[in-house]
C-alpha cells in the first residue's frame, strides 16, 4: 500500500471512529473535549446555526447520552445540549465518577480546591503544617506540576478531572521528589505591602515579577 492510499485509509478509519462515538449507542459514555484551542459550544439543537447555550472548556469530560447526525447529546454543569462529535474524544473505560470533579486551575476557589490541597499534603506534595486556603494559587499549581512529574504526565499545573480522580484513589503515589524551596516572605519598608519570592524564578527575575524577583501583595 503506497503512502497516499495509506493516508486515505487512515482518514476513512478516523471518520468511522468519529461516527461510532455518537451513533448507534444506547449506553451513556464519558467523552473529553479536545478542540485545537478554546472552548466547545454546547448548542440547543443538533445544528451549527443553533443557539449556543454553554461553552465547555477544552479538556473537560462530560457524559454523552445520545446522538443525532454527527452531534452528541451531552450533559455538563447542569445543562443538556448538543456538541459536535468532531471535537470529542471517547474515554473508553472511564469511570463516570470522574465527572463528579470539575477542572481546577489558577484563580478557582471552593471546597474542592481545599480538598485537593489536603490530599496533596497527605501524600507529601505539600509540607505538613502549611497554611491552606480554598484558593487555587501559584503554590498549588506548582504542587500539581510536582504530582504530574511524579506520575509522568504533562506538567501544566491544571488539575483535570482525570488527574483528580487518580489523585484521590488508592493508586496515587506518595511524593518521592524533592519539594520546592520554601518561599521567603518579608515586609516591605517602603509601601507597607508584603512581598514574596517569585515562584517561577525563585528570586532570579522573570517576566512574572517584572524581573524584580519579588511579587508584592
Image (cartoon, rainbow, N blue to C red):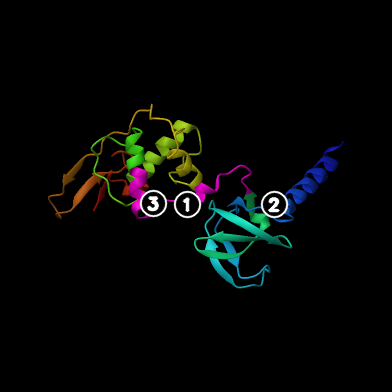
Q: Earlier in the sequence, mark 3 or mark 2?
A: 2
Regarding mark 3 in the picture, which secondary structure is present there?
loop
Q: Residue at x 62, y 56 (%)?
A: 64
Q: Earlier in the sequence, mark 3 or mark 1?
A: 1
Residue 206 visible in the current orientation: no
66 left or right, relative to 9: left
Q: Tell me the CA gap for discs 2 and 1.
A: 22 Å
The span shown in magenta is 90-117
Q: Tell me the CA gap for discs 3 and 1.
A: 19 Å
84 left or right, relative to 198: right
Classify 199 as above or below 64. above
Give residue 153's mark. Answer: none
Residue 4 visible in the current orientation: yes
Q: How many marks?
A: 3
Q: Tell me the CA gap for discs 3 and 2.
A: 32 Å
Instruction: Work out which quarter of the rendered image holds the N terminus and state it.
Output: top right
**CB within 8 Å, label 2 to label 1:** no
| Residue bearing mark 1 | 100
Instruction: In this rendered view, identify the residue nearer to me: 158 or 97.
Output: 97
| Residue bearing mark 3 | 106
Place of residue 145 in the rendered image (x, y in percent of width and height, measured from the top left): 42, 39
Give residue 21's mark. Answer: 2
Amino acid at each position: 500500500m503506497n503512502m497516499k492510499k495509506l493516508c486515505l485509509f487512515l482518514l476513512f478509519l478516523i471518520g468511522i471512529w468519529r461516527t461510532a462515538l455518537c451513533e448507534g449507542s444506547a449506553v451513556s459514555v464519558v467523552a473529553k473535549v479536545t478542540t485545537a484551542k478554546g472552548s466547545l459550544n454546547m448548542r440547543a439543537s443538533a445544528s451549527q446555526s443553533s443557539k449556543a447555550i454553554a461553552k465547555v472548556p477544552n479538556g473537560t469530560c462530560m457524559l454523552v447520552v445520545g446522538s443525532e447526525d454527527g452531534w452528541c447529546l451531552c450533559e455538563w454543569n447542569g445543562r443538556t445540549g448538543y456538541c459536535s462529535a468532531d471535537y470529542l474524544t471517547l474515554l473508553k473505560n472511564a469511570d463516570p465518577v470522574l465527572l463528579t470533579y470539575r477542572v481546577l486551575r489558577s484563580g478557582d476557589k471552593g471546597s474542592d480546591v481545599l480538598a485537593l490541597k489536603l490530599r496533596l499534603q497527605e501524600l507529601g506534595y505539600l509540607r505538613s503544617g502549611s497554611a491552606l486556603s480554598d484558593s487555587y494559587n501559584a503554590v498549588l499549581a506548582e504542587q500539581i506540576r510536582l504530582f504530574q512529574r511524579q506520575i509522568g504526565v504533562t506538567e501544566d499545573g491544571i488539575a483535570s478531572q482525570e488527574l483528580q480522580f487518580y489523585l484521590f484513589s488508592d493508586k496515587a503515589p506518595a511524593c518521592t521528589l524533592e519539594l520546592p524551596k520554601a518561599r521567603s516572605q518579608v515586609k516591605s519598608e517602603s509601601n507597607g505591602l508584603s512581598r514574596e519570592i517569585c515562584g517561577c524564578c525563585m528570586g532570579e527575575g522573570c517576566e512574572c515579577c517584572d524581573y524584580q524577583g519579588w511579587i508584592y501583595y
